[in-house]
Image: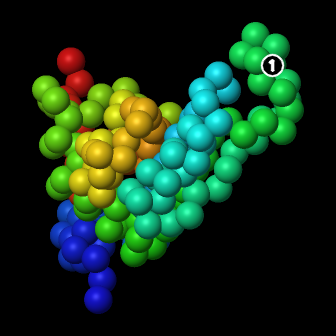
Amino acid sequence: MKPRLQQKYEEEVRPALQEKRGYANPHQIPRLEKIVIHMGVPSSAEKTALEEAMRDLAAITGRKPVVDKARKSVSNFKIRRGMSIGCHVTLRRAVMYEFLDRLIAAALPRIRDFRGLSPRGFDGRGNYSFGVEDQTIFPEIDLDKVTRHQGMDITLVTTAPTDEEALDLLKLMGMPIAEKK
């Protein structure tokens, strides 16, 4: 059975985008390709910080995170080449749609004074990135086991060639992106 958001994309969003933009070829219609969730861990943090970040990210996504290592030494940040500096998970296909559905329906509304995501998070190539300051907005996280609050960066990678097309796609999918001022 397909996730709810994937069915919505196939039955409602694709036809609406094709009608609005006038795509001749169905392969031109933008779609969500993958979602990358990254948690950076400061090098000055205690030794268990990376394990806790990996545990929380695994609970949120349902996938085992990959450890990110520093590519080169940076003395100002007290980072040496090969040090563990964070972890990330890449979600695709059905798991991606399920995570996006939970993010839109359960996690983002739990942010205090939430008025929508910034429309300035696009990179010029149709990808959208935003940060979440605290992992406890996700209902999968047990608040009793959280020892330190950890933020994360979430990137939605689309096949849209422009930011306007990606904005249309994400708004039709239900992302709460605020209006430009």
Give the image quarter of residue 66. bottom right
The single residue placed furthest to the top in the displayed view is: 76
Amino acid of disc 1: Val
Residue in the picture at 61% in, 30% down: 46
Q: Quadrant of the N terminus?
A: bottom left
Q: Position of residue 154 (x, y in %)?
A: 44, 44
Choose top left, top right, bottom left or bottom right for residue 15: bottom left
Q: Nearer the viewer, residue 107 or 32?
A: 107
Q: Quick check: 15 left or right of 76?
A: left
Above or below residue 4? Residue 175 is above
57 relative to 81 in the view: left or right: left
Could you tell me how many numbered marks the image carries?
A: 1
Can residue 29 be spotted in the picture?
Answer: no
Q: Position of residue 176 (x, y in %)?
A: 20, 42
Disc 1 packing (10 Å; few <14; some 14–19; many ≥20): few
Asked if residue 13 lies left or right of residue 128, the reply is: left
From this viewpoint, is residue 136 visible? yes
Q: Nearer the viewer, residue 156 or 162?
A: 156
Report the quarter where the C terminus lies.
top left
Q: What is the image's colouring? A: rainbow
180, above or below 52, in the image: above
Disc 1 is placed on an element classified as loop
Q: Residue at x 30, y 83 (%)?
A: 2
Q: Tell me residue 67's x, y (percent).
A: 67, 50
Q: Nearer the viewer, residue 181 or 78?
A: 78
Q: Which residue is found at the position 76% from the left and 10% from the top?
A: 76
55 over 84 or under it: above or below = below
The residue labelled by disc 1 is 74
Q: Position of residue 96 (x, y in %)?
A: 41, 65
Residue at horizontal 39 percent and vertical 32 percent from the top? 149
